[in-house]
Amino acid sequence: MKFSSPLLLGHRGAPRQARENTLESFRLALEAGLDGLELDLHRTRDGVLAVYHDFELDGQPIAEADWSALQQQAPWMPRLEQVLELAEQFPQARLNLELKSLPGPSDGREAALAQALQAWPARERAWISSFDPLALIRLHRLKVDVPLALLYAEPEMEELVPCLPVQGVHPHFGLLNEARVAALKARGLFVATWTVNQAATVRELLAWGVDGFIGDLPTELLAGGR
């Protein structure tokens, strides 16, 4: 993953200033001077890639809802294409697209994301991460033209990395120490971590060689990484 380091990303935008995963939150993070955004994607029943964190909205699975119904319930919820349009206004902005998925049969969300990125001329500014190793394998088989990264909060997940077609890893920062970062970097992996909300933690992790930081507070990320 050939991105500048350190890479400072707004976790769902700037969620302490505006509702997370909204265009307002994303714009605030970018206007604050962050390098880019981390955002969450689900596929609706009718094939729209909706930007939302949880698998359900008011008890209704996102995957079983049509986009028109979601817009009535949550008019603030954007679709991926709207975020890509916003990113066009910030030509240097990077996008970490987290595909929300659970291991099991696919509903086509990987293909929908691959198609959306294929249509975006600036896709070299994006990469995809997921907690679901099957989703990452499917994206690779679809020949998605962006890097892939494994997200994890359990140390055992790291054992899957050699089996996966990934160029990066996104461990929770609590899993990292200097030796662990060195071992991951020795494999040629891009290491980005979450959710880092203190400048001192950014500085410590940066000294260990971490490449990217995902956090809720743009001021803390910038104070620690610049």
Image (spheres, grey):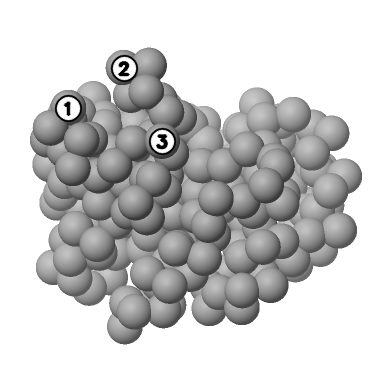
Q: Nearer the viewer, residue 188 or 201?
A: 188
Query: Which residue is tagged 3?
Result: 64
The three-letter amino acid code for the residue at tag 1 is Gln
SS category of the residue bearing label 1: helix
Q: From this view, report whether residue 185 is shown above or below residue 219.
A: below
Residue positioned 51% across, 42% down in the render: 100
Q: From this view, report whether residue 66 is shown above or below residue 19.
A: below
Residue positioned 44% across, 54% down in the render: 97
Query: Which residue is tagged 2?
Result: 58
Q: Nearer the viewer, residue 198 or 147?
A: 147
The three-letter amino acid code for the residue at tag 3 is Glu
Cα distance in 3D space between marks 3 and 1? 14 Å
Checking the image for residue 73, the label placed there is 1
Q: Is residue 134 visible?
A: yes
Within-10-Å neighbours for mark 3: few <14, some 14–19, many 20+: few
- Of tags 3 and 1, which is closer to the observer? 3
